[in-house]
Amino acid sequence: MASGSPPLTGVTKITENDIICGRGGVALKHPGNLAYRKIVGLNKGIYATCLKVEKLKISKSIVAAIREIEGRFLEREDGKPTSSLDERDENGNPVTWKDIGDKRAIEKTSQALREGQPKLLKKLAAMQGNMAQAPLPQSAQTTQQQQMQEQMNSSWSGDPSP
């Protein structure tokens, strides 16, 4: 690990860019998780319709974007559920967290991208059926793709608010 890099274990200070792995209110409401879910949501349509080799690239790019702003994918070292980020263990010490690493973060991101996919694919197929009746000219399709890309890029500025 390079000097200046955040520790991978024994983490007691969680930042707003960190992703809290787990269930419940803490993970749902944490600013890093809100931003992460927004990024995942913006990529679900692309993920659902792209080739398998591209799917992994999307997951990796989302994890890389979080890492780029010094975000970590954290889980409690003791494996217990969390009720508060200020929680202490039975000895009065702060609860410690560990980074799950890129491999698990990419796996979790791929899973998040797949959530709701059958429903999304049905919706996309219905939209495509409607579009088949009035196809867009190639220039309009390109503009539409550029607008989606710009929206994705501008939606993530490091500000975790939705």
Image (tube, rainbow, N blue to C red):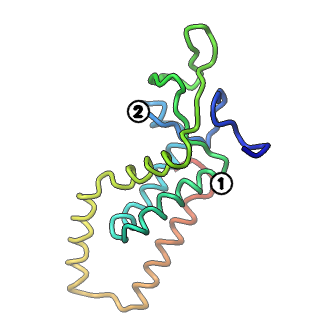
Disc 1 secondary structure class = helix
Q: Earlier in the sequence, mark 1 or mark 2?
A: 2
Q: Which residue is mark 2?
A: 23
**Residue occupying the far top of the picture:** 91
Which residue: 69% across, 36% down? 7
**Residue occupying the far right of the picture:** 3
Q: Which mark is residue 54?
A: none
In the rendered image, residue 81, in percent from the top left (x then y), is placed at: 44, 24
How far apart, in angstroms, are the residues tagged by discs 1 and 2?
Answer: 25 Å
In the rendered image, residue 111, in percent from the top left (x then y), is placed at: 38, 50
Which residue: 58% across, 33% down? 98
In the rendered image, residue 60, in percent from the top left (x then y), is placed at: 52, 58
Q: Which residue is mark 1?
A: 68
Hey, what amino acid is under mark 1? Glu
Disc 2 secondary structure class = loop
Which residue: 20% across, 86% down? 133
